[in-house]
Image (spheres, rainbow, N blue to C red):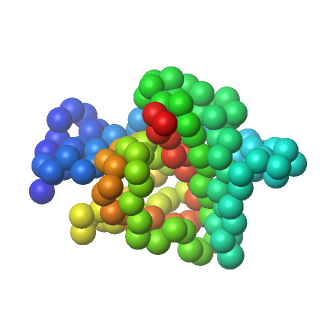
Amino acid sequence: MVWKTKQDTIITPNMNYKLERNFNKEVPSWQSLLENYNWSLVNKKIVKHICPGFFVSHDAHLIKEVEVSLQKLNCKVAHLYFNTCFGPTFGKHKDDVDVHFWQVQGITEWIIDNNKIILSPGDLLIVKKEVYHEVIPQTSRAGISMSKL
């Protein structure tokens, strides 16, 4: 069961997550995303890679389109997550901060509280801290995870 609060916004009754369809359709291109990951590599910043094809950069705040979303959400930190194939992610896990996940390329399925949520480019999913969730790429995909810390 979900409650609809306004056009394109869905909040669950237990408030573990909030989904906002079409939060920001001005998404970064694949080229901008790959350049950001490459910048992180070249500058010896924090990056992660899980074979096959899952990559993480902690420098997404440097992407022009991300700056707008950070300001709108009053967030300070932005990480880039992308999959180049149907590969692994971090599996079922929880975070120690509220996560604002902006889907920017491709399609991703999220499982939260036994609910399946499909994200498309422009959608925003806010997951409360300590809430278990799992992310499953449905296509090559990219997203920006933002937080206040």
* Image label count: 0
Q: Front-most of 77 and 6?
A: 77
Q: Front-most of 137 and 39?
A: 39
Side of 58 relative to 42 (left or right): left
Side of 8 relative to 32 (left or right): left
| Residue 37, percent from left and from top | 75, 50
| Residue 8, percent from left and from top | 29, 39
Residue 116 higher or lower than 29, as above or below: below
Residue at screen point 24% across, 69% down? 114
Residue at screen point 67% across, 51% down? 57
Residue at screen point 71% across, 51% down? 46
Q: Front-most of 21 and 37?
A: 37
| Residue 144, percent from left and from top | 55, 45
Side of 38 relative to 143 (left or right): right
Q: Quadrant of the N terminus?
A: bottom left
Residue 132 higher or lower than 63, as above or below: below
| Residue 83, percent from left and from top | 62, 64
Q: Is residue 138 visible?
A: no
Q: Is residue 58 visible?
A: yes
Q: Which residue occupies the extreme right position in the image?
A: 42
Residue at screen point 71% across, 55% down? 47
